[in-house]
Amino acid sequence: MNISFQEFIKELIKYKLILLGEIHGTKEIPYEIKKIITSLTHHNLKKVFFEAPIEEQKYLDDFIKTGSISSLNNIPSFKYKENSDGRNSKEYLDLIEYLRSKKTVKIFFVDSIKGDLNKRDLNIYKNIKKLISKDEGLSIFITGNIHAYTEIINLKDIKMKTTGYYLKKDLKDKLASVNFIPANGNFYNLGLKKINKKYNLSKITIKRTNKGYEYDYLIPKVSPCSFMH
């Protein structure tokens, strides 16, 4: 069932934690996330978590404190590399800079670089759990759509328990997961890649779903992200 953006926001404010599952490396998805965040800042949004190494929180804190763009550009994982996966895009740095202007919203890095696929997602879950409490408002986790999936998934011959799986078991109906789905275009994740979908969209379409995600957020076309050099 399709719903409007306004209906979508009205439903999101009922939750405690929202997972925004994306394909890394587009210009358009961070823009759509910014639209969602902007709307939710009027509805008690308190924290935004990024899939970036928790060890780099000190660089983020320095930027939040000083507002110095140089400190933002010095975040190690955001420096351009030939094998960049899109999480370090200029679009996400711009989003972090925008979030700093929202004085009521706190920003955190929660990724774990330790362990195999299952261990990493378990650690991300633990990092998030430490940062949310019963008496606070709404939180958002921006992550890859695999990590946002709320059921066990088969990946590389491994039955993977995702961050979304652990959070759903914990928060139950207080958690919603959104899957951003580009219908066409290109993105940059370890190189330039093409979206191979079998349908056409003329406009952004939001649908309720019930397997692995609560919502599908379909985008007609995406283009590759840009990077700081």
Image (cartoon, grey):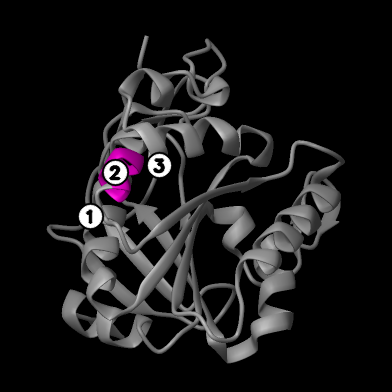
Looking at the picture, how far across and down is residue 3, in whole percent?
Answer: 23, 82
Amino acid identity at mark 2: Asn
Specify the label residue 196 is tagged with: 3
- Corner quadrant of residue 25: top left
Label 2 crowd (10 A; few <14 / some 14-19 / many >=20): some
Looking at the picture, how far across and down is residue 157, in whole percent?
Answer: 85, 48
Q: Real-space Cα distance between discs 2 and 1?
A: 8 Å
Residue corresponding to mark 1: 200
Mark 3 vs 1: CB contact within 8 A: no
Camera-side residue: 229 or 150? Answer: 229
Which region shows up in magenta?
95-100
Q: Residue at x 47, y 14 (%)?
A: 80
Residue corresponding to mark 2: 184
Looking at the picture, how far across and down is residue 124, in whole percent?
Answer: 71, 54
From the viewer's perspective, is 202 left or right of 26? Answer: left
Asked whether residue 97 is drawn in magenta, I would say: yes
From the viewer's perspective, is 138 left or right of 182? Answer: right
Decide if residue 151 is in sight here.
Answer: no
Decide if residue 154 is in sight here.
Answer: yes
Q: Residue at x 33, y 25 (%)?
A: 68
Camera-side residue: 55 or 218? Answer: 55
Label 1 crowd (10 A; few <14 / some 14-19 / many >=20): few
Q: Quick one: SS at disc 2?
A: loop
The prevailing secondary structure element of the residues shown in magenta is: helix
Mark 2 vs 1: CB contact within 8 A: yes
Amino acid identity at mark 1: Asn
